[in-house]
């Protein structure tokens, strides 16, 4: 049905995987998620967060007006009542760590934002993935010999690097006149 002049336009329908489960059925819901994570593990956090934003009271957690981020309006109620419903814990630090792992950032007004986490685009949730840090280079060089001295011993055992001698000066030419 079309929205009449005084009513807001209807929100887009959520994908079946998001919209049909109650928070009491979350373990079943998580098992049904698409396998998008590393080694095929479901990345449930973005979907559960989206579900939370759609179902929980706006006085606790709500989308920003533009739908590009969300704010937690009542931290105490969020920690005491909401977190445990969706994540099996009531630790805000763990929730914040998940936000950071998935690439959410706080903007200048304190809202959590992610370029692929949008109120009007639940189909983009598969693009909200864990950001892996770049691997750290090993401390030793791969070409190092096994048992070779390291640290100060390596410096003391290594031959000193000597600069090559300067080239000889060009021969002097004498002219007879």
Image: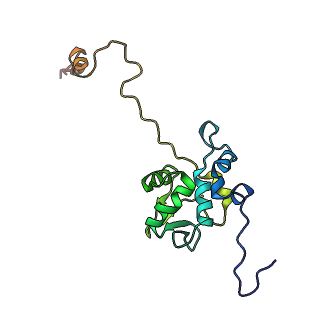
The residue lying at 50 percent from left, 67 percent from top is 71
The residue lying at 54 percent from left, 59 percent from top is 114
**Up-down relation of residue 163 to residue 35 (above or below):** above
**Up-down relation of residue 66 to residue 31 (above or below):** below
* Residue farthest top in this picture: 147
Residue 66, how many percent across, how many down?
58, 72
The quadrant where residue 11 appears: bottom right
The quadrant where residue 124 appears: bottom right
Instruction: Report the side of 136 relative to 61 (left or right).
Output: left
Residue 150, how many percent across, how many down?
28, 19
Q: Quadrant of the C terminus?
A: top left
- Asked if residue 167 can be seen in this view, the reply is no
Instruction: Report the side of 141 relative to 113 (left or right).
Output: left
The residue lying at 33 percent from left, 12 percent from top is 147
Instruction: Report the side of 100 relative to 152 (left or right).
Output: right
**Up-down relation of residue 37 to residue 58 (above or below):** above
């Amino acid at each position: 049905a079309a929205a009449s002049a005084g009513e807001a336009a209807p929100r887009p329908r959520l994908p079946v995987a998001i919209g049909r489960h109650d928070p009491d059925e979350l373990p079943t819901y998580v098992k049904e998620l698409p396998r998008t994570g590393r080694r095929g593990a479901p990345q449930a956090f973005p979907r559960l967060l989206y579900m939370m934003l759609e179902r929980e009271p706006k006085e606790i957690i709500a989308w920003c007006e533009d739908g590009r981020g969300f704010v937690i309006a009542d931290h105490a109620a969020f920690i005491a009542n909401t977190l445990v419903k969706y994540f099996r814990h009531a630790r805000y630090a763990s929730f914040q760590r998940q936000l950071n792992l998935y690439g959410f950032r706080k903007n200048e007004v304190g809202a959590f934002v992610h370029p692929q986490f949008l109120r009007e685009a639940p189909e983009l949730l598969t693009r909200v993935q864990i950001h892996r840090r770049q691997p750290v280079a090993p401390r030793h060089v791969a070409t190092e010999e096994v048992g070779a001295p390291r640290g100060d011993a390596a410096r003391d055992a290594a031959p000193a690097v000597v600069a090559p001698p300067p080239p000889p000066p060009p021969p002097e030419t004498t002219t007879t006149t």
